């Protein structure tokens, strides 16, 4: 089972070649989403993407599954797992 990570609004996540940062989170609890900058230097993947709970993002070398998105301009955060995927 992949490890669960949590990333706050004003922080950055690094795991090997993978880097994530939150650009913004929604303020609406009825529509929780986060705009996340995802970079996988090993596979050349880079994208800013809106994610919601349950979304899966394949970077080529990793599979990210977003399990929680908490809206908020100051205390918003996301929770996600990272699994090594097969290069595409």
Image (cartoon, rainbow, N blue to C red):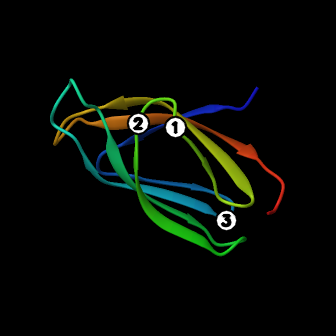
Q: Give the image location of residue 43, x and y in percent.
A: 71, 71
Q: Give the image location of residue 14, x and y in percent.
A: 56, 56
Q: Residue at x 20, y 25 (%)?
A: 29
Q: Residue 27, located in which quarter of the rendered image?
A: top left
Position above or below: 42 against 88: below
Task: Specify the label residue 52 is tagged with.
Answer: 2
Q: Residue at x 72, y 61 (%)?
A: 60
Under circle 3, the secondary element is loop
- Separation (CA) of disc 2 from disc 3: 23 Å
Under circle 1, the secondary element is loop
Q: Quadrant of the C terminus?
A: bottom right
Which-is-in-front pick, marks 1 and 3? 1
Horizontal side of residue 30 vs 16, given as left or right: left
User: What residue would you read off at disc 1?
Assistant: 55
Q: Earlier in the sequence, mark 2 or mark 3?
A: 3
User: Are the residues at dot 2 and dot 1 in contact (C-beta closer than 8 Å)?
Assistant: yes
Under circle 2, the secondary element is loop
Q: Give the image location of residue 7, x and y in percent.
A: 43, 42
Horizontal side of residue 19 vs 27, given as left or right: right
User: What residue would you read off at disc 3?
Assistant: 17
Return the residue nearer the eye: 84 or 29: 29
Horizontal side of residue 36 vs 18, given as left or right: left
Horizontal side of residue 51 vs 2, given as left or right: left
Q: Quadrant of the N terminus?
A: top right
Image label count: 3
Position above or below: 41 against 29: below
- Separation (CA) of disc 2 from disc 1: 6 Å
Return the residue nearer the eye: 65 or 8: 65
């Amino acid at each position: 089972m992949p490890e669960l990570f949590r990333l706050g609004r004003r922080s950055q996540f690094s795991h090997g070649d993978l880097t994530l940062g939150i650009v913004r989170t929604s303020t609406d609890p009825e529509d929780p989403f986060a705009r996340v900058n995802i970079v996988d230097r090993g596979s050349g993947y880079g994208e800013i993407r809106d994610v919601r709970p349950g979304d899966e993002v394949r970077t080529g070398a990793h599979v990210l599954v977003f399990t929680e998105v908490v809206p908020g301009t100051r205390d918003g955060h996301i929770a996600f797992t990272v699994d090594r995927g097969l290069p595409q």
